[in-house]
């Protein structure tokens, strides 16, 4: 089984308006980490940059404008994916896995591919993904009413996962937390008969 755990940091919350400035992840095949990556990306020049979104990630407009252009990062990302998946084999794809990725990150990542002239996003990835937030919802049904929100940080705290709060909203650290939450849920999951 091929899983791409990943997280993005963006210039806002609208995939059709804003862009990506960080893509981090981990390639996991049959439970073994094969590669870890952390790409800083100069966002699409046509995207809108919301200052508030940058503040959340502790970066400035000046910083992200110095990152490698999106076309270069796209080529590096695809070169890495090509080491593990044959995009021409319909049976060979990654499951995308992240925290709230089904309703957020996946849309941004697909838009990133399209902006780079690649309309074959689903040659790399299965259309159904693993959303660790959804898995955590089922796992924490009995606790949810005591939780102030369902942010990744809150879920990690509730599960007893140690946090380094100063690292939150850095995509590479958020991937670490996502995997820790995923491992916790998988290790305590009850198997139904």
Image (spheres, grey):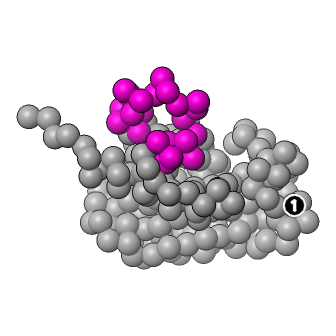
Quadrant of the snapshot with the C terminus? top left
Q: Position of residue 35 (x, y in %)?
A: 45, 75
Q: Nearer the viewer, residue 183 or 134?
A: 183
Residue at screen point 87% across, 61% down? 60
Residue 11 visible within the image:
no
Residue 155 in magenta stretch = yes
What residue is shown with label 1?
60
Q: Position of residue 191 (x, y in %)?
A: 16, 40
Q: Nearer the viewer, residue 100 or 127?
A: 100
| Numbered range of the magenta stretch | 136-158
**Left or right, residue 135 beside residue 168:** left
Task: Assign a secondary structure to mark 1.
Answer: loop
Residue at screen point 43% across, 57% down? 179
Decide whether the magenta segment is chiefly helix, strand or loop. helix
Residue furthest top as drawn: 145
Q: Position of residue 181 (x, y in %)?
A: 42, 51
Q: Quadrant of residue 137?
A: top left
Q: Nearer the viewer, residue 187 or 96?
A: 187
Residue at screen point 65% across, 70% down? 39
Q: 10 Å neighbourhood of mark 1: few (<14), some, or many (≥20)?
A: few
Vertical arrangement, residue 192 with respect to residue 178, above or below:
above
Vertical arrangement, residue 91 with respect to residue 52, above or below:
below
Q: Nearer the viewer, residue 148 or 87?
A: 148
Vertical arrangement, residue 118 with respect to residue 134, above or below:
below
**Left or right, residue 84 beside residue 80:** left
**Left or right, residue 22 beside residue 58:** left
Q: Quadrant of residue 135?
A: top left
Residue 157 in magenta stretch = yes
Residue at screen point 59% across, 65% down? 172
């Amino acid at each position: 089984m091929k899983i791409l755990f990943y997280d993005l940091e963006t210039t806002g919350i609208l995939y059709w308006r804003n862009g990506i400035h960080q893509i981090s992840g981990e390639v996991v095949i049959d439970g073994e980490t094969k590669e870890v990556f952390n790409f800083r990306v100069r966002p699409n020049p046509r995207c809108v940059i919301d200052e508030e979104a940058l503040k959340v990630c502790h970066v400035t407009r000046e910083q992200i404008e110095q990152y490698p252009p999106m076309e270069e990062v796209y080529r590096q990302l695809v070169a890495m994916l090509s080491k593990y998946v044959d995009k021409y084999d319909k049976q060979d794809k990654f499951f995308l896995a992240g925290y709230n990725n089904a309703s957020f990150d996946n849309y941004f990542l697909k838009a990133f591919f399209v902006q780079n002239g690649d309309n074959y996003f689903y040659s790399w990835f299965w259309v159904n993904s693993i959303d660790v937030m959804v898995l955590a919802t089922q796992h924490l049904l009995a606790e949810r009413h005591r939780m102030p929100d369902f942010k990744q940080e809150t879920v990690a705290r509730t599960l007893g996962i140690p946090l380094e709060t100063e690292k939150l909203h850095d995509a590479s650290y958020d991937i670490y937390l996502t995997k820790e939450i995923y491992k916790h849920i998988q290790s305590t999951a009850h198997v139904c008969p």
